[in-house]
Image (spheres, rainbow, N blue to C red):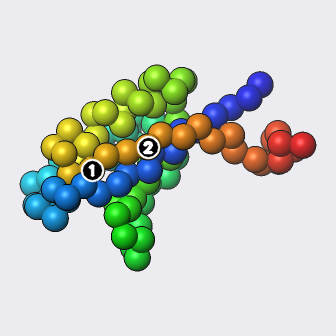
Amino acid sequence: MEEWLYVMMIKKTKEYRKLNKAGVIEHVGNLRKLDAEGSIELAGAFKGYPGMAGMFILKAKSYEEAEAMCKQEPLVVAGYATYELYRLQAANKENNYLL
C-alpha cells in the first residue's frame, strides 16, 4: 500500500515583516493542535533562504485533507504567508526504499 506525506512549503509575503508576537503565538498554537492530532511528521523554520519561512510535513488521508490543514494555518489566514503543497512518498526499509 502506498503511503503519502504532504509537504507544505511556507513562503513569506510582503506582510510577513509585520508579523508580531500574537501572530507567532497563533502559529505555534496551530502546530501544537496538529501535533496533538498526530498530523505533523516534522515542522521547522528556514534560515538563510530569502522568501521562505519554513515547512510542515503533514500526515493526512488525502491531498484535500492536507490542503484544508494548510488553509487553516494562521500565517496563511492572516496573509503573512502563502504555501505550496506537494505529495511526498517516503522511501524507507518498510517499502524497500521504493524499489
- Amino acid type indicated by mark 2: Glu
Q: Residue furthest bottom?
A: 48
Q: Is residue 46 left or right of residue 81?
A: right
**SS for dot 1:** strand
> Where is mark 1, residue-wise?
81
Q: Quadrant of residue 76?
A: top left
Q: Residue at x 16, y 56 (%)?
A: 15
Q: Residues within 10 Å of mark 2 (few under 14, many from 20)?
A: few
On the question of residue 17 being in view, the answer is yes
In the drawing, does residue 41 fall left or right of residue 93?
A: left
Residue 68 is situated, as x and y percent measured from the top left of the image, at 37, 27
- Distance in Å between CA atoms under marks 1 and 2: 10 Å
Relative to residue 95, is residue 19 depicted above or below? below
70 or 58, nearer to the observer: 70
Quadrant (top left/top right/bottom left/bottom right) for the N terminus: top right
The three-letter code of the residue at mark 1 reads Ala
Q: Residues within 10 Å of mark 1 (few under 14, many from 20)?
A: many
Say which element carries label 2. Answer: strand
Q: Quadrant of the C terminus?
A: top right
Q: State how many labels appear.
A: 2
Can the viewer see residue 24?
A: no
Direction front: furthest residue? 14
Q: Which residue is mark 2?
A: 84
Residue 30: % across, % down = 27, 42
| Residue occupying the point 49% across, 52% down | 42
Q: Residue at x 83, y 42 (%)?
A: 98
Left or right: 8 with respect to 2?
left
